Amino acid sequence: MTPEEAALRIATLRAEVARHDELYYRQARPELTDFAYDGLKAELARLECAFPSADATGGPSPTSRVGDDRAEGFARVRHRQAMTTLDNTYDEAELREFHARLVRALSAEDLAYTIEPKVDGVAISLTYEEGRLSRAVTRGDGEEGDDVTANVRTIRSLPSTLADLAPPAVIEVRGEIYLREEEFRRINQLQEEAGEAPYANPRNLAAGTLKQLDPRIVASRRLEIVLYGIGHCEPPVATSQTKLHDRLRAWGLPVLDPFWSVRGPEAVWTAIRELDARRRTLPFGTDGAVVKLDAFAQQRHPRVGFRGMAADGQAEAARKLSPRWACAFKFPPDRAETRIREITIQVGRTGVLTPVAELEPVLLAGTTVRRATLHNADEIARKDVRPGDTVLVEKAGEIIPAVVAVVPGRRAPGAEPYVFPRACPVCRTAAARAEGEVAWRCPNPDCPEQVRRRLEHFASKAGVDIDGLGEEIVGQLIDRGLVRRLPDLFRLRLEDLLPLRKSGEIWAANLIAGIDARREVELWRVINGLGIPQVGAAAAKELARTFRSLGALLDAPVADLCRVEGFGDKTAHAVRTWCEQLGNRALVTDLLAAGLSPRAPAAVAGGLAGKTFVLTGTLPTLAREEAAALIEAAGGRVSGSVSRKTHYVVAGEDAGSKLAKARDLGIPVLDEAGLRALLAGG
Ligand code: IVH
């Protein structure tokens, strides 16, 4: 590989990994199995290592930061001690290398380890002050997360006080929030009965639940928690992971079971195999084992510590990434062999044509799999998948199964390479592929299948949220030609619906009332419901806040779109392109004419509206949360990282890399007095 090729591949992989991080951490709707994701990330890390000069091509690489789960609507809280992630491997040899490195670093042969299940849930940090639960915060970007205390307090198995007569003054206890399989199924059943899309897997549902703004909804879903670690702790409570485990349990906190304390690599391996044999019987999803060096003194040894710091303990990068004293060994996902009966094409709401393998049913990870995604035309060509082929299908957790590879030597003679269709299978319009995109699309916005999916999305909880309008009804409305375009929905009359159901007067009246009730609806819901490429709920909210009307959004120049919080060039251009298309402009006009009346968000009063601040270091009198609250009350926004879009950096004592970056970018830096002057209108 030439350096140019490497640079290109690195750029592609970074964009891919960043996209999947966004899908996993923020949107809780991953497209890849963890295994496939880990593969991308490992390839990226290898290339970055082999071609370090290619490193200068952009912002920080996703290999040098943790995913970010922070969402709208929660107070941001700084962790007293950062939350890191774990290095992982699927390879026994790498696990042995992990041990060998520790032996070298500590000059000790006989090392004690713990082995724990790796819980497939959502990371959480609980703060207990004088033994009382005071805060629960998500991992966020590792340094600051979302305050989800009210939601976590609904967890019945979590005590709000520690069973200890002399508890530590302050302790951050770390663990994972998850949902049991039965509970996942129960909630999904309700979702489906309500005509809502089911959640992909228990982890996504747990993540989505934890980020609910209404604690009553959270309380109606039975979240569980398990605790396995500590962050900041004053005074210390244990000298090893084993003792910590015992202590957490003695406090009445739910802890991991099974849990092994062993010596030496052979015993580690035996425990991992035992865990593998038992993992499907555990209450939480487990995709691996976490091996930790047991003694805290050894963990803290200057030659162990954290990746992201130099070996001498001096900060090399400003933050800790992952501990060298722990390693996650992940079990490979479940795979099975089966035959592809045929390849069909699914049309998405943006017209994307997704090839799907229709399989001979096969049992995989406890469920019967009949269909698996083939992703796109390039992937089919790359793997040379042909109808009739015997293939390996993979499934991790509840994620959509995927075809991984063709089993060699089993192809029927005469099997022809698959030719991706040139036309939409539903409306027969010639398929098109935009430059630089992998997906082929049906370019006909009135394609009935697209309209059906768009309408489903428009009416869904994330969109305009119309009561009673689920997949089934949408299908009937489309099939009967009652709705050909979105605006038709708002022109439906009672008599149109009556033929759909026997004695359906009440049902029809309710549906009409449900639609009427959502004519006046928050602007962001309409924007999200329109299905603009690259725009999800979070982006829709930012667009609504910035432009305040559909008209202003349609006419927004790219330069203004680029300034929207969280928008890069690509998103800005995608939105602009969508807004320029005459069909889309007509759609918006027609929706308004049909009586849709979007409501702009309440204007934020205050002199700092539209200004983004980053806080760093310790201010003389204001705590970070207080400073953030003052800024937000004045209409400003507080962000965790410095970029060109930052308007001010407020720096206190011990400000580090963020201050340096602000100076680099020429962003004005304020001290506390400067901030106060600005707040006072100075
Ligand atoms: S130890 C600094 N132990 O997996 C040590 N983490 O992929 C990090 N996780 O961020 C945490 N089970 O959210 C640890 N038994 C376990 C775990 C566990 C699940 C999560 C945790 C971590 C992520 C890393």
Image: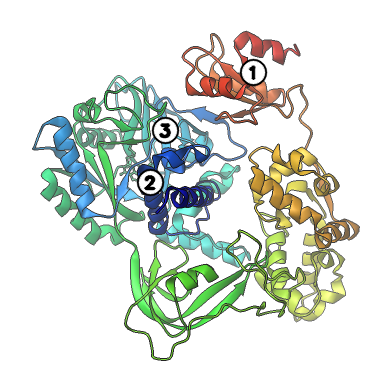
Question: Ligand 1 closer than 8 Å to the CB at disc 3?
Answer: no
Horizontal arrangement in the rendering, residue 449 relative to residue 581 (left or right): left
Residue under the point 26% across and 48% down: 257
The CA distance from mark 3 to mark 2 is 32 Å
The CA distance from mark 2 to mark 1 is 35 Å
Q: Quickly name the residue at label 1.
A: 668
Residue nearest the observer in this picture, 242 or 537: 537
User: Counting other residues with Cα less than 10 Å from the Cα at mark 3, is it few (<14), some (14-19), or many (20 or more)?
Assistant: many
Q: Quickly name the residue at label 3.
A: 126
User: In the rendered structure, which disc, 2 or 1, sits on the residue that comes first in sequence?
Assistant: 2
Tag 3, which secondary structure?
strand
User: In the rendered structure, which disc, 3 or 2, sits on the residue that comes first in sequence?
Assistant: 2
Residue nearest the observer in this picture, 88 or 189: 88
Tag 2, which secondary structure?
helix
Residue under the point 70% across and 46% down: 572
Q: Quickly name the residue at label 2.
A: 45
Residue under the point 44% across and 38% down: 65
Horizontal arrangement in the rendering, residue 248 relative to residue 615 (left or right): left
Question: Residue 320: where, in percent of width, then height?
Answer: 37, 31
Q: Which mark is residue 251?
A: none
Tag 1, which secondary structure?
loop
Residue 221 in view (yes/no): no
